[in-house]
Amino acid sequence: MLQKFLEQGFFPICDKETLKSLGVDKLLYNPKFNISDYFTDDIAVLQRRSVVFGDVLNVAGLYDLLQKMTKRLSSFSEILRSESEIGNKERSIFSAKQLQLYFEIIDEAEQYYVTLPDKEFFASEEFKQLFEQIHTIANSKEYLDLKKGTHKLINKITHIKSISVGFNFDTKLSPVEMGITSINDQYIQSGKLIDKILRMDFSADGLQAIEPIVAVDKTLFSDEFDVLQNSLLRAVDKIFTRAIRDWPREFTKYIEDQLSFLLNLLSDFQFILVVTEIHKKLMESGVPMCVPNYHGKDERVFHAKRLYNPALAIRMSEVGESGKLVGNDVKFDDKGRIYILTGPNNGGKSVFMVSVGMAQILAQLGMLVPAEQLDISPVDHIYVHFPEYQTKEKMGRLEDECARVKDIFATINEYSLCLFDETFSSTDSDEGCQLAFEVLRAIESFGAHAIFGTHFHHLVRLIDEAKTELNVCQSFDYLCAGIFGGKQRTYRITRSKPEGKSYASAIAEKYGLSYEKLAHD
């Protein structure tokens, strides 16, 4: 029996606020699973997952089959929820529906498996084991006997399209009795009483209503709808109860065991489908995609070539601007464990930092990463402080920023990745520079990796003085967002020391407030 697939482990490398700041909540959102359940630092697990995701992308028809299986397994879960609400004595019709879905899943998966030209198409052991297990079930005597013994009953139940209900009235036209008059294998058609009057024909029209049919869920409140649905299900259930209760006990036990095996895979399948959708969109965008080369955590490796922001790549592809995407290289090493990132507004600094955080997250889910190459070690924590996106509390913004940073230092360690964008920019430059300098030195003392995006050019001088005069900050280096000819943004991030200018002329030019324009136009 297959006991594991993607091997969930609940290794939360970041909180919900970080996922939101990096845009992961939108990129990988699905209410059916919790993304935190799939983070891991186990390299063997991550490597196995990359092979699983590769199978779904590369083996013809597998993605479509998983979609169908997931839809039916979700129906299982919904039936189980309904069962808990309807009571123990009236569950036979639910059992029949479960059995029908079970047959559909096994038969469709078996048909797919036996028609594969080569079973070695699966590179992952997980899919090999899954389909071998389904093949064993589909050809077992128990399964074949179950299908044969329940075929007529299942067929009768699953072909129910409508129910006709009758009422007996007293002389005051008050309903005194009611009951189901027929269970039909076709839908009741909408009609109008006036049509019958105009054609002077009051004979039976079969399954045609004399008033327009209206949607039940649009005319009843949700609690009224649930009462009606449960009442009708109970009535239908009683009609088939005797037949289903006559099923051998071993059949019921067999169904329960097999449903458990499949339901345990539901959240994994849902996660795989969401991941595959993202992989497909990124491939359609034209950006290079790679399987990360994983290194041990103690090596603390992060070396990316032509790294892209996945969310931006998808958005630009959707509007036909993929050709404008810019990939960047970044490498953490002994002389660059902490980077000070400077450059003009809208020069790509924030997008670059998000791409670094996203790469770490996608890699620790076992996904492909939008880059030409990525060598990476797992981290324990990703900390993000983007004040623009953080929830602002009642106290002043600076106090809010300080509180957030203090919270980060409560759990930071040498296996942490910190991404700070314009932190402490809410105060004056001198005070902000000093706060940033103190925080960055503290990050260095823990041995963590960090990128600090800032407009504080005085911070560069503080760090240079600390390097030469105090012999500290030796693991600090600089990244710059490029600008061509003093005006045109290149969105290239290079490992170089900033020139010390504030890009004021470029900003003035952008908004038409340069001296030349104001004085001479």
Image: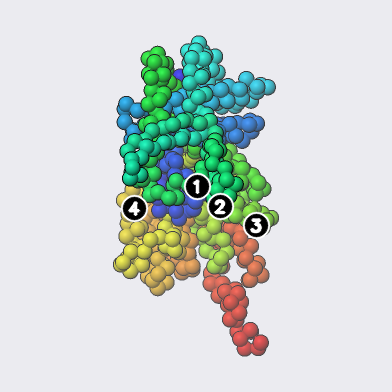
Mark 2 nearby-residue class (10 Å; few <14, some 14–19, many ≥20): many
Cα gap from disc 2 to disc 1, whole angstroms: 51 Å
Mark 1 nearby-residue class (10 Å; few <14, some 14–19, many ≥20): few
Q: Mark 3 vs mark 4: which is more N-terminal?
A: 3
Q: Position of residue 244 (x, y in %)?
A: 41, 20
Q: Which residue is mark 4?
A: 409
Q: To which quarter of the image does residue 240 belong?
A: top left
Could you tell me which secondary element the residue under label 4 belongs to?
Answer: loop
Q: Does 159 sit left or right of 519 as displayed?
A: left
- Name the image quarter holding the N terminus: top left
- What color scheme is it? rainbow
Could you tell me which secondary element the residue under label 2 belongs to?
Answer: helix
Q: Amino acid at mark 2?
A: Ala
Cα gap from disc 3 to disc 4, whole angstroms: 41 Å
Please report the residue visible at 37 percent of the width from the left and 37 percent of the height from the top: 168
Q: Mark 4 vs mark 2: which is more N-terminal?
A: 2
Q: Mark 2 vs mark 3: which is more N-terminal?
A: 2
- Determine contact: label 2, label 1, CB under 8 Å: no
